[in-house]
Amino acid sequence: MDHVFHHGLLSFDPFAAKKHSGLKGSVALLEQLLQFLSLLEDTCGYTSDEEIFKTFFQAALWANEFDLSLHAQGEHHVGGTSDLPTHIRRMLECMVVNDTHELWRFWINRMKGPRAVSPKQEHITSIILDNAGPELVADLCLAEFLIRSQLTSRVVFYPKCIPWFVSDVTATDIDWLLKVGLSTEFLPGPIGVLAHTWACRWTERFESGEFLVRNSTFWTLPCDFAELAANERTLLDALTQSDVVVFKGDLNYRKLVGDRSWIPDNPQHKLNAFRPMQLGRTVSSDGLIDCKCTPVSESTSDSRMPPLGAPVDCRCHNESSPSSPPLVIALRVAKADVAVGLSPEMLRKVTTESSDWWTLGRYGFVQLISPLYFG
């Protein structure tokens, strides 16, 4: 009886009903996501197009507004009657850090440039998930685009290993979404037929290994990411060996920066905050990043050194990571009073609008946190 009791507790998700009702209440957003994905397949196909790339990354960001910890009754304003690209363009005015263009350029240069990854090598994108419901659908749409456009060959999803903060994704949520949540029984009408089609496609990708789920207890530990090596070296090695790592959500962002009171527009504070996440880069004895390549910032057209803290396409190798350091990106809708990497102009703008700007769930970050230029 004791075994049965504890097993039942371990498999019970007290937030499941809210996650499920939240998905059903997000039909407008699901239609935007899945219709746009289907339109690409039916018309121009999946191409390495920057605007499409930006649309899927921005969709994966703003679908975060589903977060049930903010919207107790499941209300959220993502979606509506406009098509997905139009809605994303409207949301650009709410971006306080937007490195999507740099991410695109570095990604494409690594895939197609003179030092591109060999076609025979596996390209891995790791996504540290945040919320269930429509945000998980947006993450799967992003993964589908990356696979079909040949920007990656495998997407590894990292969910929470236990129910966490109401709407956080578990492996069980992924399984439920594919088997039930995107079925015609759960979503009646045309959207159900469309959703079922994509659920079948994604199930095949999981079965083939193009999509993969990996669990780790680290995501629910009370640790920031500077403590990753001490707590789970295997996970750190897996992320370091990825080509791209995407951290999603406000809590992951807080862990990335150590949840400290950094000065938002101070470049040195940005470097100090993100130093632990310079994955695959060599740290010298004095704690500095030992970069021997000549990084070129997207803000310059030649080999002059970029501004301190700017994203750079570093290709240095070290003994523990024979490939280039992964591109590490954070997608975050701000809900806590911590941030780095804002320009002085942007900080003035948002603080003029509200002194509590970073806790309103209104402002977005698509922020490259590694590789950065350390001087």
Image: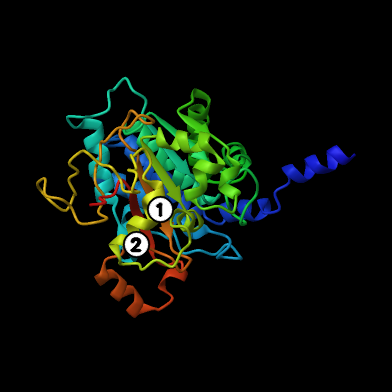
| Residue bearing mark 2 | 269
Residue 89 spot, x, y in % from top left: 30, 59
The one nearer the camera, 211 or 272, is 272
Q: Earlier in the sequence, mark 2 or mark 1?
A: 2
Q: Residue at x 48, y 66 (%)?
A: 336
Residue 238 spot, x, y in % from top left: 46, 33
Looking at the image, the residue that sits furthest to the right is 1
Binning the other alpha carbons within 10 Å of mark 1 as few (below 14), some (14 to 19) or many (20 upward) gives many
Give the CA separation, mark 2 to mark 1: 19 Å
Residue type at mark 2 is: His
- Which quarter of the picture shows residue 365? bottom left
Taking the image as shown, residue 266 lies to the left or right of residue 71, namely left
Residue 355 spot, x, y in % from top left: 40, 78
* Residue 331, label in figure: 1
Residue type at mark 1 is: Leu
Q: Residue at x 45, y 44 (%)?
A: 139
